[in-house]
């Protein structure tokens, strides 16, 4: 199975991505330390470092740094994609089972030209550029009808699944909605039908008054540990302005999120 495919678990209805070729990814963490003081500013073997553009498939989007001379972020195709834009979302039968081609997109956002930079230590301007990059790709990708879900995520360290040290995050676009997201949407709809209010707005209003689980707050966002956190160190960042989509974020909110 050289290309990816998506199969449905008949017992749960969950769609599962099969992309065996991703096992061919480089694993830089196996050879190098994660200690930042030993990570060089530039690595001649890293495809994400400035000057190593020949190692990239191509550049989808590039955002300038604050000097306007160099670049701050780049968006590139994932060299080992879980999903690809070829094909469509047509379901196919395999005996009693249901599947479909591995349609979607898988992109990498290079967050800095520097190999040893990390988002937690960047200045606000640098982080704001990353968020602007997220927003631009989100709005562009959502213009395609087949794209039903966009998931942006960031793995940090080998234990989280990162294969390269260079600071980066990823975008996965799918032609279906994962069950864990659909379930939350359905629960939010059920809550609104029952109370006539948004469940997340109610959570935020209570937490802002209670304060016991508030991590940070600014004019646009509230960072809070959820009352029923499912994993250690789980934190939600909730926008104070009621919005249905990240695509609706304003320039002021981008700055506050940074």
Image (tube, rainbow, N blue to C red):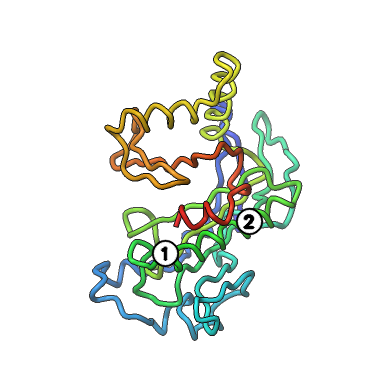
- Binning the other alpha carbons within 10 Å of mark 1 as few (below 14), some (14 to 19) or many (20 upward) gives some
- Nearer-the-camera pick, 181 or 119: 119
Tell me the tag on residue 52.
none
Please give the residue where the numbered disc 2 appears in the rendered image. 105
Identity of the residue drawn at 43% across and 28% down: 203
Secondary structure at badge 2 equals strand
Q: Quadrant of residue 59?
A: bottom right
Q: Position of residue 231 (x, y in %)?
A: 32, 37
Secondary structure at badge 1 equals helix
Please give the residue where the numbered disc 1 appears in the rendered image. 124
Of circles 2 and 1, the one toward us is: 1
Q: Residue furthest top?
A: 194
Give yes or no for contact between labels 2 and 1 (Cβ–Cβ under 8 Å). Answer: no
State which tag comes first along the sequence, 2 or 1. Answer: 2
Identity of the residue drawn at 31% across and 67% down: 30
- Nearer-the-camera pick, 175 or 27: 175
């Amino acid at each position: 199975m050289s290309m990816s495919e998506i199969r449905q678990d008949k017992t749960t209805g969950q769609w599962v991505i099969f992309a065996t070729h991703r096992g061919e990814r480089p694993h830089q963490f196996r050879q190098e330390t994660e200690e930042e003081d030993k990570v060089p500013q530039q690595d001649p073997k890293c495809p994400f470092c400035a000057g190593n553009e020949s190692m990239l498939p191509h550049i989808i989007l590039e955002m300038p740094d604050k000097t306007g001379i160099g670049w701050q972020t780049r968006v590139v195709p994932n060299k080992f994609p879980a999903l690809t834009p070829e094909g469509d979302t047509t379901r196919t039968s395999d005996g009693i089972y249901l599947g479909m081609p591995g349609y979607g997109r898988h992109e990498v956002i290079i967050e800095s030209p520097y190999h040893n930079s990390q988002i937690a230590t960047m200045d606000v301007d640098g982080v704001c550029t990353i968020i602007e990059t997220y927003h631009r790709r989100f709005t562009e990708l959502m213009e395609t009808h087949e794209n039903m879900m966009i998931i942006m995520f960031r793995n940090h360290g080998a234990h989280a699944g990162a294969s390269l040290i260079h600071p980066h995050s990823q975008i996965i676009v799918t032609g279906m909605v994962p069950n864990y997201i659909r379930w939350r949407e359905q629960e939010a709809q059920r809550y609104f039908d029952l109370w006539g209010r948004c469940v997340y707005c109610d959570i935020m209003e209570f937490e802002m008054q209670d304060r016991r689980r508030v991590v940070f707050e600014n004019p646009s966002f509230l960072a809070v540990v959820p009352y029923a956190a499912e994993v250690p160190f789980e934190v939600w960042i909730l926008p104070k302005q009621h919005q249905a989509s990240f695509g609706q974020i304003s320039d002021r909110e981008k700055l506050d999120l940074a």
